[in-house]
Image: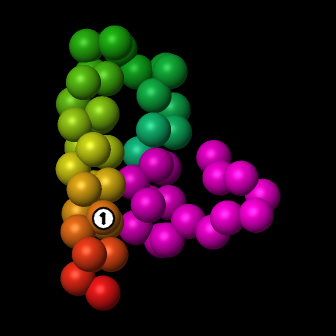
Amino acid sequence: MTAPDTVEPPAVAAALSRLDGLESRPVGEHVEVFDEVHRLLQDALATLDEA
């Protein structure tokens, strides 16, 4: 999902990996997955702010 000239922090890569296989899950489960990914990305961003 990243551009060739960028490097994802491990926490971001882990969060985005939660989207793998989403298309095969029932649509009703998508919101839960999106909420989890959003939370993980917020956590990753917060750790950048601390550095």
State the image quarter where residue 46 is shown. bottom left
Across and down, in percent, residue 15 comes to 39, 54
What is the number of callouts on the image? 1
| Local SS, label 1 | helix
Across and down, in percent, residue 34 comes to 30, 33
Q: Is residue 42 above or below residue 31?
A: below
Q: Is residue 40 left or right of residue 1?
A: left
Q: Quadrant of the C terminus?
A: bottom left
State the image quarter where residue 12 is shown. bottom left
Residue placed at 46% from the left, 49% from the top?
A: 16
Across and down, in percent, residue 7 comes to 63, 69
Q: Is residue 8 left or right of residue 25?
A: right
Magenta-span inclusion, residue 11: yes
Q: Is residue 36 above or below residue 12?
A: above
Magenta-span inclusion, residue 44: no
Q: Is residue 2 above or below residue 38?
A: below
Across and down, in percent, residue 42 comes to 25, 56
Name the residue nearer the viewer: 33 or 38.
Answer: 38
Residue placed at 40% from the left, 67% from the top?
A: 11
Task: Look at the image and give the residue range highlighted in magenta.
Answer: 1-17
Kind of residue at badge 1: Leu
- Residue for badge 1: 45
The residue positioned farthest toward the top in the image shown: 27
Residue placed at 23% from the left, 82% from the top?
A: 50
The residue positioned farthest toward the right in the image shown: 4
